[in-house]
Image: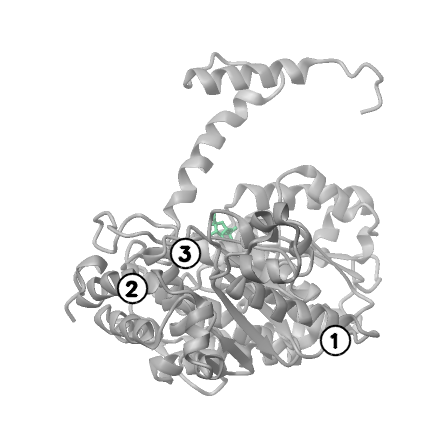
Amino acid sequence: MTSPPPPRQRPAWEALEAHHVEVASLHLRDLFAANPDRGQRLRAEAEGLYLDYSKNRITDETIGLLLDLARESNLAGRRDQMFRGDHVNVSEDRAVLHVALRMPKGTSLVVDGVDVVQEVHAVLDQMAAFADQVRSGKWKGHTGKPIKNVVNIGIGGSDLGPVMAYEALRFYSQRDLTFRFVSNVDATDFVEAVRDLNADETLFIISSKTFTTLETLTNARSARAWLIDQLGDAAAVARHFVAVSTNAPSVAEFGIDTANMFGFWDWVGGRYSMDSAIGLSTMIAIGPEGFAELLAGFHAMDEHFRTAPFEENLPVLMGMIAVWNRDFFACPTVGVMPYDQYLKRLPAYLQQLTMESNGKHVSLDGTTVACETGPIYWGEPGTNGQHSFYQLIHQGTTVVPVDLIGFAKSLNPLGEHHDILSSNVFAQAQALAFGKTEDELRSEGTPEHEVAHRVMKGNRPTNVLLAEVLTPRLLGSLIALYEHSVFTQGAIWGIDSYDQWGVELGKVLAVQIIPELESGSEPVLSHDSSTNALIEHYRALKRKEDPDGDR
Ligand code: F6P
């Protein structure tokens, strides 16, 4: 299959550039007035997710051209390559098969001579047996007590997926178990996480794909020391530590019995791993059946992405609209605002998924990309954001496309809370699209000196995602939607969405600096003058006596 030309040289890209000039002068107010059924037409629905994309600065022609661009970019071909296990992660020469993690038992996908689905289900069965033991109290700690606390130690994809999923599905979790998540190498994270826990009732899950990550191994060593100190016996590690990793030798070297290790594979990227064994804490929280529902939701969206026509395909539509906003309207960021408290960690999770995947400046062939790639993702649960940064989204000089995610039913119905919450989803999308004109303000009797300040230009794009209620299945479909939207964008830009070389340099430099900060060893510094001065100042501050002696 021949590769498509660079994005900007594709005919549809050129057509979109010309088309953008026309659309840029249109206001959503006029687009809705001219097409009263726009809100009914520019929507799509799949797997319980209703996507209203009508409040984007698009016309039918825009969608047609964007889908032409998808075709010219060989999106379908790239998608099929991923699903069949080709090495689409070219810079690391690896298959990218998170979709195999949720293929149903009994199906098969043979990659490099191995049926990966069978392997996936063997690990899922191992996880289920362990999760059931912990949940039922049959798994006993070193002193014979059942486990009450589960602490996941990991970082990046080995933390953000588990913590996001635990928070999202907390409603369905076994409430007599406590879950904590330690990621930051800042000791405060670990110390505060275990402060009120009894070691003899605590299970540590050390989650690290590589089992070489400095932050995770440092926290894991501190956890081991804390446990041994509390229980007074190094043998306690066997009943209180399990590992999730692809690296059995390092797990064994750390002192965890590999019988208590849950494996996965190099074809699962860290940020795509929450539904692999990395989801062990999720499975302990919601049970194997709940976890199976989560996987079913992922798989259903995979199938939708794989088979639905582009015109009705949610990840394709969301991905292409993201490209439109990024490359043609030059929007540098995207806001993600879940109107559900349980999804409070979704923005952080999506930051890694989107930005580690598509924050790239090099094409698959190693040449510099000639267009903008991944935008900055950020967000907070609604309605908190409204009382903080929405001012800028409404009236600032930067246009921020926003995904608003809402649910028709609350898991915690209480008085009028839910309708008040949900009214804001619709109201914010309305206000951002239509704004308020000077004429409207004057006709409402707004004092003249306030008019200019109160004008809301509107014409600010949103996607609204609406679902019935947050369930494990729905969460799986929602995450898969974003995964495949990220894939779609990466395919258009012609980048490798599955490597992350940009995180390496900082790690290497930090390892060089660590010994320069250690007390008692103050070697001559040979960095740039700024780094030297900062380290010297750090050393001086570190030497200072605490005048009260209370720290
Ligand atoms: O440094 C980035 C990264 O490699 C992520 O891609 C990954 O999710 C994270 O570190 C953690 O890696 P590991 O699971 O190997 O500890």
Whether residue 183 can be seen here? no
In the figure, 44 relative to 355: above or below?
Answer: below
Mark 1 or mark 2, which is nearer to you?
2
Tell me which numbered mark, 1 or 2, is placed earlier along the sequence: 2
Mark 2 nearby-residue class (10 Å; few <14, some 14–19, many ≥20): few
Q: Element at badge 1?
A: loop
> Could you tell me which secondary element the residue under label 3 belongs to?
helix
* Chain-order first, disc 1 or disc 3: 3
The residue wearing badge 3 is: 357
Q: Residue at x 47, y 87 (%)?
A: 106
Question: Quadrant location of residue 519?
Answer: top right
**Callout 3: 10 Å neighbours few (<14), some, many (20+)?**
many
Q: In this rendered view, identify the residue nearer to me: 443 or 142.
A: 443
The label on residue 411 is 1
Q: Amino acid at mark 2?
A: Glu
Q: Amino acid at mark 1?
A: Leu
**Residue position for label 2:** 22
Residue 244 is situated, as x and y percent measured from the top left of the image, at 57, 60
The image position of residue 89, as x and y in percent, is 32, 60
Ligand 1 under 8 Å from disc 1 Cβ:
no
Residue flagged by tag 3: what amino acid is it? Answer: Ser
Find residue 312 and name its label: none
Eye-nearest disc, 1 or 3: 1
